[in-house]
Amino acid sequence: MSGKKAGGKTTVRKTASERAYQFAKSAILSLEYQPGSRLPEELIASELGVSRTPVRDALRRLESEGLVDFAPNTGARVASWGMSELSEMAQMRSLLEGYAATLAATKINDEQLARLEQATVEMETAAQHPQTPDLAAISEANLRFHSLIAEAANNTHLTAAIKPLWHFPLVFRKFALFKPERLELSVRHHREIIAALAARDPDWASAIMRAHIHSAQSFDHQLAVMGTQETGES
């Protein structure tokens, strides 16, 4: 009997923690909480009607994903990134994903190409209303697109090296600042990448993938400036 009670409490806590995680993550990705701003456990707990324990669990989970930083005596804050860090991350993604596209062009099959097309269609659909785009759906489709190319490359160690860069927070958060024309460019890049892969052209696939990744840097920089303004860093 006591085991069942303990199990029930664990389930309730996990549910509350998951709610807090989804709530905080959504607020961070939508820029409701700006880079460098404090994440008050007590306010989040009050908003959700839960204790602070599951909120702390959720924030620690977000810390492991790079979205949150914990500092002594100040608690959790939204992670912020400097210009040089963003540039280095873009360089790493460019090199690794460019190489993944090179490999994928020689190995990809028709079913994988169809899945890439589907992810791109879903990204377009989520962006149909420029003033209120579905940012979560856009981010999910974008991640799936890049994951599929790594899958087609069929190199386990390469995928393991790229994966942390996909979860780099600004890869997702930048969509909140995309103007419609910028999102259209991203989708055009996706379609050109698909065309290069379908043509089995490694050089073309690598070149457009690298251009695609570097084209987003100005938006990463914009977020970094926002983080600097929030934290007072120079």
Image (cartoon, grey):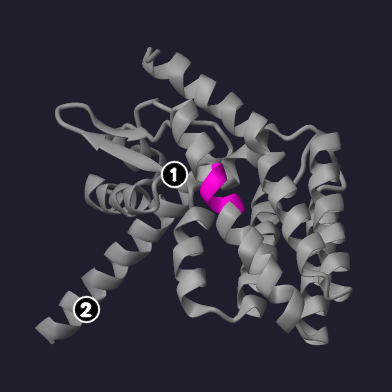
Q: What is the spatial separation of the Cα atoms under label 2 and label 1, in whole angstroms?
A: 26 Å
Q: Is residue 52 above or below residue 152?
A: above
| Percent coordinates x, y for residue 97 in the rendering | 61, 60
Q: Which mark is residue 7?
A: 2
**Quadrant of the rendered structure where residue 204 is?**
bottom right
Residue drawn at x 72%, y 55% is: 209
Mark 2 closeness class: few <14, some 14–19, many ≥20 residues within 10 Å: few
Going by the numbered disc 1, the residue's amino acid type is Ala
Indicate the quadrant containing the C terminus: top left, top right, bottom left or bottom right. Answer: top left
Question: In terms of depth relative to the viewer, which is nearer, 9 or 85?
Answer: 85
Residue drawn at x 75%, y 54% is: 207
Question: In terms of depth relative to the viewer, which is nearer, 229 or 86?
Answer: 86
Range drawn in magenta: 90-94
Mark 1 closeness class: few <14, some 14–19, many ≥20 residues within 10 Å: many
Going by the numbered disc 2, the residue's amino acid type is Gly
Residue drawn at x 47%, y 47% is: 25
**Quadrant of the rendered structure where residue 153 is?**
bottom right
Q: Secondary structure at mark 1?
A: helix
Indicate the quadrant containing the N terminus: top left, top right, bottom left or bottom right. Answer: bottom left
Q: Can residue 32 be seen by looking at this rendering?
A: yes
